[in-house]
Amino acid sequence: GAVVSQHPSWVICKSGTSVKIECRSLDFQATTMFWYRQFPKQSLMLMATSNEGSKATYEQGVEKDKFLINHASLTLSTLTVTSAHPEDSSFYICSAREGAGARTEAFFGQGTRLTVV
Amino acid sequence: AQSVTQLGSHVSVSEGALVLLRCNYSSSVPPYLFWYVQYPNQGLQLLLKYTSAATLVKGINGFEAEFKKSETSFHLTKPSAHMSDAAEYFCAVSRGGNNNDMRFGAGTRLTVKP
């Protein structure tokens, strides 16, 4: 199956700094990628939909100025957590679908464990 | 709007026993349903998917699920649990259309006892 690579797999940063997470589709082009956040022992919550060449669509309650998304190419989307605070500590997962149809499966990155100290 | 509900946040079975993880869906249109498995600190891996073809869907690792429209269910089963099946399982529905994202259930943690 298709592969989505996410980097880094874990990161520790100081409060007030920014962290960038990359999500790459390795063997297919993804016009749309999705960013999820997962708290311990909870489900995945969609944060935003990343669209190549245009602005991301954010879910209600997600601060777009805090979670900056850039989808500069058909194989790369980045999520930047700006001015991170301890409450931003979480597991972030990206996904991409090979094709636009609702039948297609989503492929997921390995996830990034962010810890803000 | 499409959504899924997973009944039971934690299921515990003995090795070799039947695994049954429950998922019910809500959708105003024919749904596309998925089951994913997540191991600790990892992303999600697809087990199987229903896309309106056969109602009994077979997936990887011996898992299967049956789509029952009358019960709005898509329960995941495996005849004989293995220790390696211990993980978190998520049922998901594809929204399609302009959004095309997936919405996930709350997840069910499967524990397998020796």
Image (tube, grey):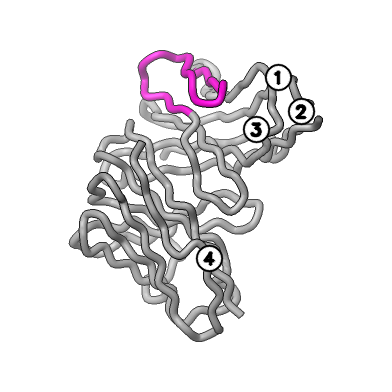
- Report the span colored magenta: B48-67
Q: Which residue is mark 4?
A: A10
Q: Chain of mark 2?
A: B
**Where does residue A107 sit, x and y in percent of width and height?**
39, 43
Q: Which quarter of the figure is the C terminus of chain B placed in?
A: top right
Density class for disc 3 (Cα within 10 Å; few <14, some 14-19, many ≥20) is some
Residue at the image position 76 percent from the left and 28 percent from the top: B13
What is the distance, in whole Å, between disc 4 and disc 1 at their CAs?
36 Å
Find out whether residue A7 is within the magenta segment: no
Of the numbered discs 1 and 2, the one sitting upstream in the chain is: 2
The numbered dot on residue B99 is none
Q: Nearer the viewer, mark 1 or mark 3?
A: 3
Residue at the image position 68 percent from the left and 40 percent from the top: B109
Q: Which residue is mark 3?
A: B85
What is the distance, in whole Å, between disc 1 and disc 3 at their CAs?
12 Å
Identify the element where label 2 is drawn: strand
Q: Chain of mark 1?
A: B
Q: Which quarter of the figure is the N terminus of chain B placed in?
A: top left
Q: Which residue is mark 1?
A: B18
Residue at the image position 68 percent from the left and 37 percent from the top: B86
Q: Chain of mark 4?
A: A
**Where does residue B57 sit, x and y in percent of width and height?**
47, 18
